[in-house]
Image: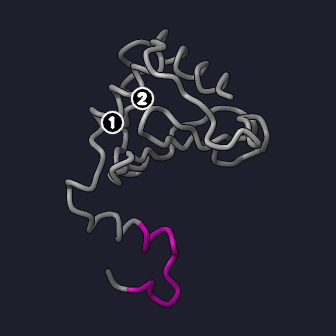
Amino acid sequence: MDKIRPGEDPLDWYRRYRATLPAERKLPREEVLALLRCIATGQTQVRLKDSRFPFHSGYCNHIWFLAEQYTIVVFNDCGAWDYIEAVEAEDGRDAEFDDWGLANPESLLEHESPRLYQQLVKAFLAAR
């Protein structure tokens, strides 16, 4: 991957870099959706990666959570749940919000079952 171009937005460079990753390095949305269902139904426990930084510890920041062999990054917008920014598997595969577009696992779960989606958010907010 080439270096950042003079005057280029670092986020644009990062998106170009992500587009060059082979498909086997990316975490499929179906796998993430299955993980979110397990968290929402209580089959998988979610906990804070660092207990010094609970969900409401900051304003407009990223909060890291652990669930089984995954790290899940949630964007906290003005002290409220906004969206899942990224998920990384222990084996190094990962995916970010921009990789999924409108068909992101979180939106698919909310469309599939609003009740289950609410349980998902509650599980994350209650994580310690």
Q: Which residues are magenta?
A: 3-14
Q: Residue at x 35, y 54 (%)?
A: 92
**Residue at 37% from the left image edge and 39% from the top image edge:** 102
In the image: residue 50, left or right of residue 34? right
Give the x, y percent position of residue 74: 57, 40
The quadrant where residue 57 appears: top right
Task: Give the position of the C terminus as an image quadrant.
Answer: top right
Q: Real-space Cα distance between discs 2 and 1?
A: 7 Å
Colour setting: one colour
Q: Which residue is mark 2?
A: 107
| Above-or-below relation of 91 to 33 | below
Q: Which mark is residue 89?
A: none
Q: Is residue 57 left or right of residue 64?
A: right
- Which quarter of the image is occupied by the N terminus? bottom left
Residue 122 appears left or right of 59 = left
Q: Residues within 10 Å of mark 2 (few under 14, many from 20)?
A: some
Q: Nearer the viewer, residue 86 or 126?
A: 126
Per the image, label 1 sits on a secondary structure element best described as: helix
Residue at 45% x, 12% y is 41
With respect to residue 11, does 5 lie above or below?
Answer: below
**Is residue 45 depicted above or below 1 in this figure?**
above
Badge 2 element: helix
Q: Are marks 2 and 1 in contact (CB under 8 Å)?
A: yes
**Residue 7 painted magenta:** yes
Residue 102 belongs to magenta span: no
Disc count in the image? Answer: 2
What's the residue at 44%, 32% (across, down)? 68
Q: 101 or 87, which is in the foreground?
A: 87
Residue identifier under label 1: 103
